[in-house]
Image (cartoon, rainbow, N blue to C red):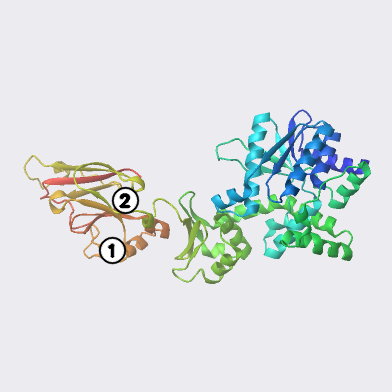
Amino acid sequence: MKGFIAKISGFIAHHQLLDPDKRYLVALSGGADSVCLLLVLQQLGYRLEAVHCNFHLRGDESDRDEQFCEALCKDKNIPFHRVHFDTHSYAEVHGVSIEMAARELRYHYFYQLLQSIDAEAVCVAHHRDDIVETVLINLLRGTGLRGLTGIAASAALPTPSADQKPRQLLRPLLAVGREDILHYLDSVGQDYVTDSTNLQDDVLRNKIRLHALPLLREISPAASMNIARTAQYLALAEPLFDEAIERRRAEALVVDKTGDFVVFSLEKLLDNEYFLYECLRPYGFTSAQVESISCSAFSPGQQWLSPTHTAAADRGTLVVFRNDHPRLGSRLQPRKMPIEGTYDLGHMGRYSVVITEQKSSISSDLKSAFPIDKSPSVACLDADKVSFPLTLRPIAEGDRFLPFGMRGSKLVSDYLTDLHCSLFEKRCQLALTDETGEILWLVGRRTCQQASVTSETRRLLKVSLLEC
């Protein structure tokens, strides 16, 4: 089996996966694949420790697997770590599937163990047939090009929290298939355990493994190798694809305020439906939603919701923003400012309310009477035309106000449209009102005419947005 070992060694070298001077964990289930991985890496001279997770999902069979792994590591003189999980309870408490619970539990434990023994990465036993199964599953579910790239030789290990140092998940066996692994174990006389659930065709991956792949190999003996090779070519092409997509995305962007909202030109965005998908995929939109957007994005007022974002057609553009953005009006409650002072109103911002009295005689020269701050973050009003308490609130449908310098009142929505505000900006717009409910100030934009400062103003009310 020198060719088998050489193939794995060459794959490791090509992808620069392992360093002989560093320590690695091997995820050992006791099945053929992980046993093969452990033996081959030991034969290649790498420093190893094994880790076994007992999820207690298969009764006595789970305990049998643990005992087998312990005995194997003792026989091979490899340090052995084990952990027991109450997987059913974890899944129930966190509201996730058993499969997701097992994944989260083992990955978090792997990360902690890597830190405690100062190991570089954890090696798992995915092989070439796993690539083929993944590609076929993604094809059946409907996928873009990325779903056809299979499984990467290395990936980031999920960390318990975002501020922790990233660790790697390595897959040294991707160059060989399941039959190669079984032949190797047979040649060295090494036994292994079999997970009985893998023999049941009750889930999609098992159906493909037990039925579809044997049929494909019957049609073409090289089917698995050819599918895996195609996935490899697509993975190599992916960086070129990403570069082209990013260039086109930059051309389609009208506004890019990452973290708040982005605005795309619909004309450029809808030029190609797959390009549209690639632009919206990071925001959680599905291929079905992308198809809907492609068909009806030019219809006024159309909106689409992903689990995390909203996409809305707005005057020849598509605006995308987070559903939980803290400044959205739907998430804010009106806040009162009953007297002068400084107010911290959370996501609405921090405000200063000050009244200044004119102590000298009335002057027709406003500049000498009161210094009028024309900054968008400041509202200068005639205090005697304003009734406290002041209220800061999100704008509402049907709101009207009389903009300073204009003769007639205007719908706030129309006013914001005239300013070419995006839908996100409209939904975040705040209004300052007094006790009468009249809008005194569209925060950051314009004050009202009724409370404007004139030559007869004796007291100046200055409301300043200090911090947004």
- Quadrant of the frame with the N terminus: top right
Q: Position of residue 27 (x, y in %)?
A: 74, 41
Q: Residue at x 10, y 50 (%)?
A: 456
Say whether residue 11 is visible.
Answer: no
Residue 399 marker: 1
Q: Position of residue 299 (x, y in %)?
A: 48, 71
Q: Residue furthest front?
A: 60
Say whether residue 401 is visible.
Answer: yes
Q: Residue at x 84, y 51 (%)?
A: 178
Q: Nearer the viewer, residue 279 or 449?
A: 279
Q: Position of residue 393 (x, y in %)?
A: 29, 55
Instruction: Identify which amino acid the numbered label 1 is placed on.
Output: Asp
Give the image quarter of residue 202: bottom right
Q: Are marks 1 and 2 in contact (CB under 8 Å)?
A: no
- Quadrant of the frame with the C terminus: top left
Q: Residue furthest top?
A: 21
Between the residue at mark 1 and the residue at mark 2, the CA separation in whole angstroms equals 17 Å
Q: Is residue 419 above or below residue 360?
A: below
Labels 1, 2: front one: 1
Give the image quarter of residue 135: bottom right
Q: Is residue 249 left or right of residue 322?
A: right
N-terminal label among 1 and 2? 1
User: What crowding class fits label 2: few (fewer than 14 Cα within 10 Å), some (14-19), or many (20 or more)?
Assistant: some
Q: Is residue 116 above or below residue 350?
A: above
Q: Nearer the viewer, residue 146 or 160?
A: 160
Name the residue tied to disc 2: 444
Instruction: Identify which amino acid the numbered label 2 is placed on.
Output: Gly
Q: Secondary structure at mark 1?
A: loop
Q: Position of residue 328 (x, y in %)?
A: 39, 55
Q: Secondary structure at mark 2?
A: loop
Give the image quarter of residue 358: top left
User: What crowding class fits label 1: few (fewer than 14 Cα within 10 Å), some (14-19), or many (20 or more)?
Assistant: some
